Image (cartoon, rainbow, N blue to C red):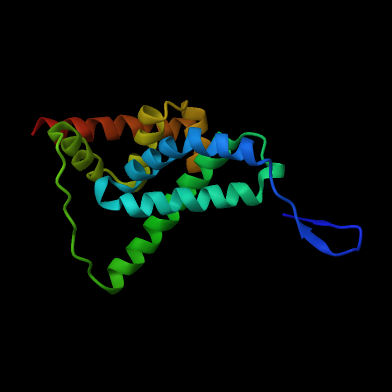
Amino acid sequence: MTAISSDGMPRPVEPDGPAFAAVYAELYPRMVRVARLSLGGAGNAGAAEEIVQDAFVQLLRNWDHVESPAGWLRTAVVNGCRSWGRRRVIRRRNQPQPRVSVALDDGDALAVRDALRSLSARQRTAVVLRYFEDLPEREIAELLGCRPGTVKSLLARSLLRLREVLDD
């Protein structure tokens, strides 16, 4: 962000530090959770944190124009996860990557993360936004660029798949 000073030179404009810091403190853990679950779980913790940090940098750059920081960040994080997923597919095509397994203490959490990995990226994102972020289908549809009916269908198929995987 820049403004023109009295001498006609551009100068940086700083956003309201305390307001931005409060938004960061409140939303950072939630956005990391959304990103981690959207990316498929524990193996992508670093990528999730990087995506969220990038989203906060973008928010800082656009601070004067953002009316709803939570919604703006959620959109930026979901889009960041989509981009990360596309880049990952391209990398995998060009060079196989070994899988990294992470041991977790909570067996149920591990089972849920494994089950989430069995879903497509779009299904996983819909499930995370609906059941972990508690967003209505209309907002999920806007974030995914589809109709609310498509979100309902994605969620129904995802829940069936999750039940199959978790019951085995």
x and y percent of residue 34 in the render?
Answer: 39, 39
Q: Is residue 147 visible?
A: no
Q: How many marks?
A: 0
x and y percent of residue 18 in the render?
Answer: 62, 37
The residue shown at (19%, 42%) is 114
The residue shown at (30%, 52%) is 44
Q: Is residue 138 visible?
A: yes
x and y percent of residue 68 in the render?
Answer: 62, 34
Q: Quadrant of residue 95?
A: bottom left
Quarter containing the N terminus:
bottom right
Comparing 67 with 168, the one in front is: 67
x and y percent of residue 64 in the render?
Answer: 71, 43
From the viewer's perspective, is 35 left or right of 112? right
Q: Quadrant of residue 63?
A: top right
Quarter containing the C terminus:
top left
The residue shown at (53%, 41%) is 73
Seen in the picture, residue 75 relative to 3 is either above or below; the reply is above
Q: Residue furthest bottom?
A: 94
The residue shown at (22%, 44%) is 118
Q: Residue furthest left?
A: 168
